[in-house]
Image: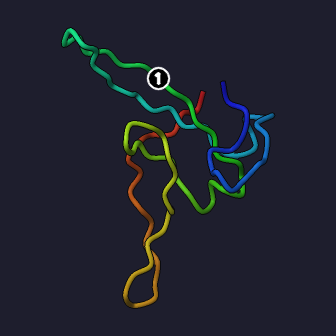
């Protein structure tokens, strides 16, 4: 169950869908008898954090990464989204 923003340094509680962005990740796993299964997990970033970060699947769990890369020229470029956000 979602209770707060996925950003570990943010403590904003999840209350409304209109504040921030909800992400859905399809997580694949295999058990000991070689059966593959998948499940959906939902992650939420508050409005302030979703302006700076995006949700990615890393090391078997959802985590955040900066939305923008700083280029050697000093400009910024937006990361390509690895997972599509969930819009209800």
Say above or below: 38 vs 83: above
Q: Residue furthest left?
A: 34
Q: In which quarter of the image is residue 35?
A: top left
Q: Which residue lies furthest to the front in this view?
A: 32
Say above or below: 65 vs 87: below
Say above or below: 26 vs 36: below
Q: Nearer the viewer, residue 50 or 57?
A: 57
Judging by the rendered image, the residue that carries numbered circle 1 is: 40
The residue sitting at 37% across, 87% down in the picture is 72
Rendered location of residue 37, percent (x, y): 31, 15
Q: Which residue lies furthest to the bottom in this view?
A: 73
Rendered location of residue 69, percent (x, y): 43, 72
The residue sitting at 72% across, 53% down in the picture is 10
Pick the quarter of the image with the N terminus: top right
Total residue callouts = 1
Callout 1 secondary element: strand
Question: Which color scheme did the rendering employ for the protein?
Answer: rainbow
Rendered location of residue 19, percent (x, y): 75, 44
Rendered location of residue 88, percent (x, y): 60, 27
Q: In the rendered view, does 43 fall on the left or right side of 73?
A: right
Q: Which of 15 and 30 is in front in this view?
A: 30
Neighbourhood count class around disc 1 (C-alpha, 10 Å): few under 14, some 14–19, many 20 upward: few
The residue sitting at 60% across, 62% down in the picture is 52
């Amino acid at each position: 169950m979602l209770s707060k923003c996925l950003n570990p340094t943010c403590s904003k509680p999840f209350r409304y869908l209109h504040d921030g962005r909800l992400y859905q990740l399809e997580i694949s796993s295999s058990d000991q008898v070689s059966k593959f299964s998948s499940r959906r997990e939902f992650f939420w970033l508050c409005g302030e954090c979703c302006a700076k970060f995006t949700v990615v699947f890393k090391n078997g769990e959802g985590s955040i990464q900066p939305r923008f890369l700083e280029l050697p020229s000093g400009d910024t470029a937006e990361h390509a989204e690895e997972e599509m956000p969930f819009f209800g």
